[in-house]
Image (cartoon, rainbow, N blue to C red):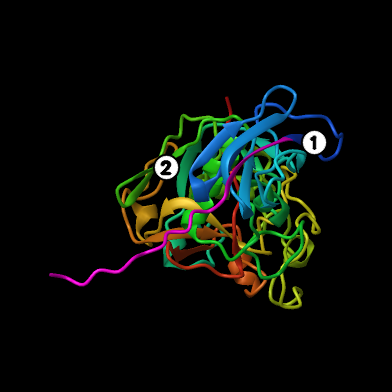
């Protein structure tokens, strides 16, 4: 016969609590807020007057997440005392918008059109693109916090570019931001791969071709080596002037389309897998990069790099499993 012991099981005190969610700017109640408590797999939605009721919430410290279209994704710490079952007020704020610039499609010569690049930038070849929108600035830390509830950056500053994110974080951000704005996400995970629905109206990462066309100034291009100037000091934060840090987005001059920091500050992830031979086999219309690979393309140079890496045609790459303090994100959306 096996030895037996008596085990005393302690059940956590569980309560039903009620409260209200308000706009922390106006003080007006917010309806339709999704309230979730992952620890107890609970989810409810506020009524039109912002009121909510949560059943079987553990007494003590709890983490509540709030989500609503048009508002920042919020993480709230809520400490519930025994028998304290009402009067909770939670607040939310509207998110910082992402300004998008319209880029009229057209045909351009992609790659090293100056004769001073490396093999991966050659041959220069003709590419035709459809219209699209691209973000005027690199995604800021404030926008990342609004969307993901955390700030991964090393160089903290609400209006500095977000950095220290993986490529997978970048496409997840695109989907999360799309959902917060009521748009259809573009990216979908299938097994170990990620696919992109380019017809969806949500945010996504730019293709290399879209990135370079926008950096060149689109159909308004002045033919400069850097995005908006032949002098990198006008438009870029790079090794010689960055003081070893990122800087406020938009603090240098824009290019012909009014887009900032496409040279310097932080490298920007593209959708494409990277292949140094791709230019010799790239399709003419709306190229989307190789169909498979291990690395993702980076464009634009950064605060850590010499000026040559900030040229509009310069190509680089990054592992999907790496992140760096000099790598960030810019977004694209379809034009209609």
Please tell me whether residue 332 belongs to the stretch shown in magenta: no
Q: Which mark is residue 23?
A: 1
In the image, 265 versus 257, the foreground residue is: 265
In the picture, the quarter occupied by the C terminus is top right
Secondary structure beneath label 1? strand
Give the residue at x 62% y 63%.
Answer: 152
User: Is 261 rendered above or below residue 307?
Assistant: above
Question: Mark 1, residues whose alpha carbon is within 10 Å: few (<14), some, or many (≥20)?
Answer: some
Give the residue at x 65% y 71%.
Answer: 307
> Along the horizontal axis of the image, is 136 left or right of 125?
right
Q: Position of residue 281 (x, y in %)?
A: 33, 50
Part of the protein shown in magenta:
1-19
Q: Residue furthest top?
A: 48
The answer to whether residue 153 is seen in the rendering is yes
Q: Quadrant of residue 331?
A: top right
> Along the horizontal axis of the image, is 146 left or right of 191?
right
Q: Quadrant of residue 90?
A: top right
Residue that badge 2 annotates: 287
Q: Are marks 2 and 1 in contact (CB under 8 Å)?
A: no
Please tell me whether residue 14 belongs to the stretch shown in magenta: yes
Q: Quadrant of residue 300?
A: bottom right
Q: What distance separates the C-alpha of mark 2 from that of mark 1? A: 43 Å
The answer to whether residue 93 is seen in the rendering is no
Precedes in sequence: disc 2 or disc 1 = 1
- Main SS, magenta region, reads loop
Looking at the rendered structure, the number of numbered marks drawn on it comes to 2
In the image, 197 versus 35, the foreground residue is: 35
Question: Mark 2, residues whose alpha carbon is within 10 Å: few (<14), some, or many (≥20)?
Answer: some
In the image, 332 versus 18, the foreground residue is: 18
Q: Residue furthest right?
A: 26
> Along the horizontal axis of the image, is 219 left or right of 119?
right
């Amino acid at each position: 016969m096996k030895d037996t012991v008596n085990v005393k099981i302690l059940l956590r005190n569980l309560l039903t609590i009620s409260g209200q969610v308000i706009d922390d700017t106006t003080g007006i109640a917010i309806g339709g807020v999704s309230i979730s408590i992952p620890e107890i797999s609970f989810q409810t939605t506020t009524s039109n007057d912002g009121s909510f009721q949560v059943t079987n919430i553990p007494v003590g410290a709890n983490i509540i997440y709030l989500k609503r279209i048009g508002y920042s994704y919020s993480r709230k710490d809520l400490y519930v005392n025994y028998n304290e079952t009402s009067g909770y007020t939670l607040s939310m704020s509207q998110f910082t918008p992402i300004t998008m610039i319209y880029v009229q499609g057209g045909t351009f010569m992609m790659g090293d059109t100056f004769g001073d690049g490396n093999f991966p930038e050659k041959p220069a070849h003709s590419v035709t693109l459809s219209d699209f929108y691209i973000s005027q600035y690199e995604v800021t830390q404030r926008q990342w916090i609004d969307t993901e509830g955390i700030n991964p950056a090393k160089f903290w500053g609400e209006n500095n570019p977000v950095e220290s994110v993986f490529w997978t974080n970048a496409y997840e951000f695109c989907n999360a931001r799309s959902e917060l704005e009521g748009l259809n996400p573009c990216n979908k995970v299938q097994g170990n791969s990620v696919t992109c629905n380019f017809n969806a109206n949500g945010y996504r990462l730019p293709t290399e071709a879209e990135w370079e066309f926008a950096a060149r100034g689109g159909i308004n291009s002045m033919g400069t080596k850097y995005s908006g100037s032949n002098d990198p000091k006008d438009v870029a934060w790079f090794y010689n002037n960055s003081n070893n840090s990122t800087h406020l987005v938009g603090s240098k001059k824009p290019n012909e389309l009014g887009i900032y920091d496409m040279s310097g500050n932080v490298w920007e992830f593209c959708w494409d897998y990277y292949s140094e031979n791709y230019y010799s086999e790239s399709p003419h219309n709306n190229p989307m990069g190789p169909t498979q690979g291990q690395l993702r393309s980076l464009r634009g140079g950064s605060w850590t790099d010499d000026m040559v890496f900030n040229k509009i045609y310069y190509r680089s790459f990054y592992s999907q499993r790496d992140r760096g303090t000099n790598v960030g994100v810019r977004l694209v959306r379809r034009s209609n």
